[in-house]
Image (spheres, coloured by chain):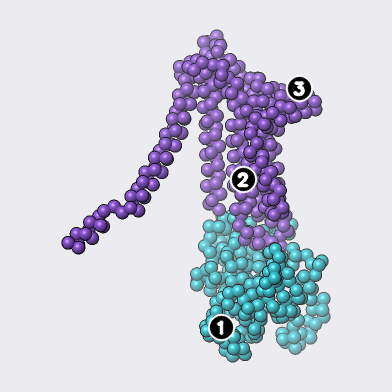
């Protein structure tokens, strides 16, 4: 809507004036009566990697899951505030969560491929959307696996079970599964915390490649990872957003004492 | 002196290790007893059942292919008339048909209890299932005899006794087993499969149909086979409604018989060691082998399911 009209000026002024793809305002989330998010306002720019960091239980994963309404699946959760995706309130009563989740894909902490073949895993999102054409599915599998930098490893065993792959391969198949649906935004909830360092760095390189075409929001416990690959970093603590800035600023020149303490390893 | 004492106390068996030994002896002897009982039952049934073919010169081919059952009499060649085909067909017919009817109901009830309304489903359906399991088979048979048989007689013709009546009674009898095992199978599907599917933009129904049910297939197959093995072995209730005529069933409403029903009918009417008695043991042996086969199938399937 408004986005299309601002396109020309935005190019003239550089990327800084580009409207955010996701904009949240004063998001509160309650598990029963327990307030897990205490008013989070932040926005995300297109084609950037944003890292959410903070100690366990600070609310960063919970916040991530509000962005594609995965918290809806948990009973007794109440959410207040505004979450806009491209100017559209995703908590509006007429919002279709099925369509939302096609635009905002998610990768989980534990690699969780379905107990099907690699091919069936990657095409799952397309097949449930009604795509039956074999040629289109084949093409989508190759594109998605190439994007996930795993095509060469797997091209000869597409019809083997995805459960037989290593953890790192499984996670990349899970990312390919999300890419095949062609979302705008990819949410990743500690995608490398269950993987070995080599698999982790492969996934990091892949994410940097992917940001050309996608907006990536990443929860991570690994601060080195956040500083290596993210453009912007947000620090969460006890349900509050403490600081949100360029990754460089957060790591080299944090404005808040809590951020500095956390980054220098004094707590958390 | 002190050293000797230490050595002595170390070499002496402690109280705990004595107890451990006793426990081991106790559990090993229990295992041995069970194995001995199972093996001797099997051997007993096998020797009696095989005697029909060895001692009494019955033909094993006749047993599986002929349909004349009158073990006391002999044909022109002097072989006893032991054509068990009507019973074999009857047993398989009621088993397969009742499983076919029960499976959709079991899966639907399990989906309701696990996916659609876990709390209410559990509250209402769980006691119902437990109650159904607890009803003695003679009660099922009695209800079948006084409700199902007249109903079939009035609406489908015939005497009402037959495979259809047996199928309907068995359907209700195997439903609780099949349902509760299907529930277990669906519950065993990890939550993260559902999350992954929903996060890819699947609806709840697509998630159930394409991921949960597909991942639960081995478990559901096990549930169905368990139901079938119960149906195959059920004697009393079936005997009360099937008519017990040793004829090849022409349709679903003509009197028929199963291996179990002929076995229970004939038990009291034959003398141990006679041809008619041995022929009944042959039926028992066949039942035993079939239930063994069902068990092997279940093991195979759950092993295959575990690979995923």
Figure quadrant of residue A62: bottom right
Q: Mark 3 Cα within 10 Å, few/some/many (few <14, many 20+)?
A: some
Q: State whether residue B16 is above or below residue A51.
A: above
Q: CA distance from mark 1 to mark 2?
A: 50 Å
Q: Quadrant of the N terminus of chain B?
A: bottom left
Query: What's the colour of chain B in the image?
Result: purple
Residue hosting label 2: B181
The reply to whether callout 3 and callout 1 are in contact (CB within 8 Å) is no
Q: State whether residue A182 is above or below residue B8.
A: below
Query: Residue B108's spot in the image, x, y percent?
Result: 71, 46
Residue hosting label 1: A262
Q: Could you say which is closer to the camera, residue B225 or residue B114? A: B114
Q: Which mark is residue A19?
A: none
Could you tell me which secondary element the residue under label 1 belongs to?
A: helix
Residue hosting label 3: B158
Q: Could you say which is closer to the camera, residue A190 or residue A170? A: A190
Q: State whether residue A132 is above or below residue B249.
A: below
Q: Is residue B213 visible?
A: yes
What residue is at 67 percent from the left and 45 percent from the top? B127
Q: State whether residue B216 is above or below residue A231.
A: above
Identify the subunit bearing mark 1: A
B273 lies left or right of A141: left
Q: CA distance from mark 2 to mark 3?
A: 36 Å
B285 lies left or right of A213: left
Query: Residue B275's spot in the image, x, y percent?
Result: 51, 15
What residue is at 52 percent from the left and 10 percent from the top? B77
Identify the subunit bearing mark 3: B
Query: What's the colour of chain A in the image?
Result: cyan
Figure quadrant of residue A173: bottom right
Query: Residue A157's spot in the image, x, y percent?
Result: 56, 57
């Amino acid at each position: 809507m408004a986005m299309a009209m601002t396109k020309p000026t935005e190019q003239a002024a550089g990327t800084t004036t580009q409207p955010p793809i996701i904009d949240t305002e004063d998001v509160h989330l309650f598990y029963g009566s327990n307030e897990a998010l205490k008013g989070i306002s932040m926005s995300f720019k297109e084609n950037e990697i944003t890292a959410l960091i903070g100690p366990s239980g600070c609310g960063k994963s919970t916040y991530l899951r509000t962005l594609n309404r995965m918290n809806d699946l948990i009973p007794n959760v109440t959410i207040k505030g505004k979450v806009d995706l491209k100017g559209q309130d995703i908590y509006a009563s007429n919002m279709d969560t099925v369509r939302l989740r096609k635009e905002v894909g998610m990768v989980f902490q534990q690699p969780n491929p379905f107990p099907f073949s690699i091919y069936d895993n990657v095409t799952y999102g397309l097949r449930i959307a009604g795509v039956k054409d074999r040629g289109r599915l084949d093409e989508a599998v190759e594109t998605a696996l190439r994007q996930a930098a795993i095509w060469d490893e797997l091209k000869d065993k597409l019809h083997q079970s995805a459960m037989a792959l290593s953890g790192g391969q499984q996670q990349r198949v899970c990312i390919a599964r999300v890419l095949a649906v062609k979302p705008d935004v990819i949410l990743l909830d500690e995608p490398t915390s269950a993987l070995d360092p080599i698999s982790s760095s492969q996934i990091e390189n892949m994410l940097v490649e992917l940001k050309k075409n996608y907006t990536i929001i990443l929860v991570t416990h690994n601060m080195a990872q956040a500083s290596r690959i993210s453009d912007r970093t947000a620090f969460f603590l006890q349900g509050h957003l403490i600081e949100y800035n360029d990754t460089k600023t957060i790591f080299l020149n944090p404005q808040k004492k809590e951020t500095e303490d956390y980054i220098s390893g004094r707590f958390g | 002196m002190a050293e000797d004492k230490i050595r002595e106390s170390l070499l002496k068996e402690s109280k705990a290790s004595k107890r451990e030994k006793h426990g081991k002896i106790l559990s090993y002897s229990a295992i041995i007893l069970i194995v001995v009982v199972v093996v001797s039952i099997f051997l007993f049934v096998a020797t009696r059942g095989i005697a029909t073919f060895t001692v009494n010169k019955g033909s094993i081919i006749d047993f599986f292919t002929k349909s004349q059952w009158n073990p006391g009499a002999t044909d022109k060649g002097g072989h006893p008339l032991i054509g068990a085909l009507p019973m074999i067909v009857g047993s398989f017919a009621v088993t397969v048909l009742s499983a076919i009817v029960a499976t959709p109901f079991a899966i639907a009830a399990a989906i309701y209890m696990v996916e659609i309304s876990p709390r209410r489903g559990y509250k209402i359906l769980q006691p119902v299932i437990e109650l159904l399991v607890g009803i003695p088979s003679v009660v099922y048979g009695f209800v079948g005899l006084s409700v199902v048989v007249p109903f079939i007689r009035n609406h489908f013709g015939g005497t009402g006794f037959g495979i259809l009546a047996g199928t309907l009674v068995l359907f209700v009898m195997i439903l609780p087993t099949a349902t509760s095992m299907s529930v277990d199978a669906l519950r065993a599907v990890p939550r993260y499969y559902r999350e992954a599917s929903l996060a890819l933009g699947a609806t709840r129904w697509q998630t159930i149909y394409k991921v949960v049910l597909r991942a639960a297939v081995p478990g559901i197959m096990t549930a169905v086979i368990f139901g079938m093995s119960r149906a195959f072995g059920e004697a009393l209730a079936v005997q009360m409604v099937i008519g017990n005529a040793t004829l090849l069933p022409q349709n679903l409403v003509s009197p028929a018989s199963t291996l179990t029903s002929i076995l229970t009918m004939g038990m009291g009417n034959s003398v141990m060691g006679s041809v008619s008695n041995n022929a009944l043991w042959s039926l028992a042996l066949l039942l035993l082998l079939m239930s063994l086969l069902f068990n092997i199938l279940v093991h195979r399937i759950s092993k295959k399911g575990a690979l995923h």
